[in-house]
């Protein structure tokens, strides 16, 4: 199970599937979207995901929140983001804060910043109040489905696993499964997630089937169990590598083959650590320095 920051996973999803997120969050469906990856001009504040809707000439700013405490506060930050975006792009800004994990904190039910002279409003979505149907039927939003409203969380996770398994494109299926496993960790125990997602999806892979066939030929249950465990470890290693390479591509673009080879040599624990660190590595030299410090050299 990867230990990447939950809100950063959501950011990657929103940047990878901007049309689907815009369709969900906007009343009028956009026909064309440009993802803004440039940071706002004043540091250190940077919007988690800004999407520029060229047809409607506006910006959709999505912010994902796992924690309810922040400095500065979320309402003030939304005001600050809005002013900066309007000043830089000169277009209306629609803002949505999405709280991922259930909480009774007042900030999750606050939709405005107010002081003596200013009132600024934004929209808040609490995932635990959302109807699961929309998310179950849309592969791009499927990783968020485990966090939606339900009277039976385990049945919901089973439905999510079934829908992930139905995705025909193998690469997309594996990516969506990885995102789903991470976000499901906000609500479910690791063992249940692995049981319903990792193991079932792995059974479709050629590598897993090959391990099972070899185990059957040996005809020993102990050997079968060892083979399955080894297959599971290889599957987790491959999943962690795929996800890290995807994040690195989003962060830095095409990388030199020598760097990719170094990443491929990392073990599962090192890949998980890299996944946590990627979005804090702003420049390529910082990635190289991280690899120098954490690789097996």
Image (spheres, grey):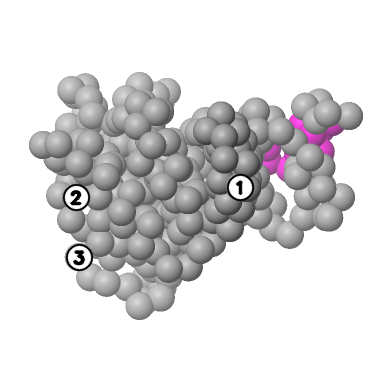
State whether residue 97 is above or below residue 253.
above
**Residue 293 shows which numbered tag?**
none
**Residue 27 shows which numbered tag?**
3
Residue at image x 52%, y 33%? Answer: 221
Residue at image x 61%, y 47%? Answer: 217
Residue 19 place in picture, x, y as percent:
37, 67
Residue 275 place in picture, x, y as percent:
60, 37
What secondary structure is found at the residue carrying circle 3? loop
Choose between 190 and 295: the one closer to the eye.
190
Q: Which residues are the magenta region?
A: 279-292
For marks 3 and 1, the one nearer the N-term is 3
What secondary structure is found at the residue carrying circle 1? helix
Q: Is residue 73 something that shows in the picture?
A: no
Position of the C terminus, as image quadrant, is top right
How far is mark 1 from mark 2, CA to CA? Answer: 43 Å
For mark 1, what is the residue?
217
């Amino acid at each position: 199970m990867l230990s990447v920051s939950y809100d950063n996973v959501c950011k990657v999803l929103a940047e990878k599937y901007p049309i689907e997120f815009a369709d969900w969050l906007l009343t009028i469906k956009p026909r064309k979207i440009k993802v803004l990856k440039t940071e706002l001009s004043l540091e250190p504040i940077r919007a988690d995901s800004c999407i520029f809707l060229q047809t409607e000439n506006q910006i959709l700013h999505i912010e994902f929140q796992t924690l309810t405490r922040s400095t500065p506060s979320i309402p003030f930050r939304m005001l600050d983001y809005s002013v900066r975006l309007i000043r830089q792009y000169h277009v209306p800004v629609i803002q949505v804060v999405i709280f991922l994990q259930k909480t009774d904190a007042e900030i999750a039910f606050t939709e405005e910043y107010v002081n003596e002279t200013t009132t600024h409003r934004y929209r808040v979505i609490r995932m635990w109040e959302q109807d699961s149907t929309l998310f179950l039927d849309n592969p791009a939003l499927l990783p968020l489905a485990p966090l939606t409203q339900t009277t039976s969380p385990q049945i919901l996770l089973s439905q999510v696993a079934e829908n992930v398994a139905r995705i025909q494109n193998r690469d997309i299926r594996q990516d969506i499964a990885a995102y789903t496993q991470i976000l499901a960790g906000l609500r479910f125990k690791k063992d249940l997630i692995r049981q319903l997602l990792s193991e079932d999806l792995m059974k479709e892979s050629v590598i897993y089937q090959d391990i099972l066939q070899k185990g059957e030929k040996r005809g020993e249950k102990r050997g079968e169990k060892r083979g399955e465990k080894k297959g599971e470890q290889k599957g987790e290693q491959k999943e962690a590598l795929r996800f890290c390479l995807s994040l690195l591509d989003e962060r830095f673009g095409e990388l030199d083959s020598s760097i990719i080879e170094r990443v491929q040599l990392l073990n599962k624990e090192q890949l998980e650590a890299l996944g946590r660190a990627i979005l804090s590595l702003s420049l390529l030299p910082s990635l190289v320095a991280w690899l120098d410090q954490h690789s097996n050299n």
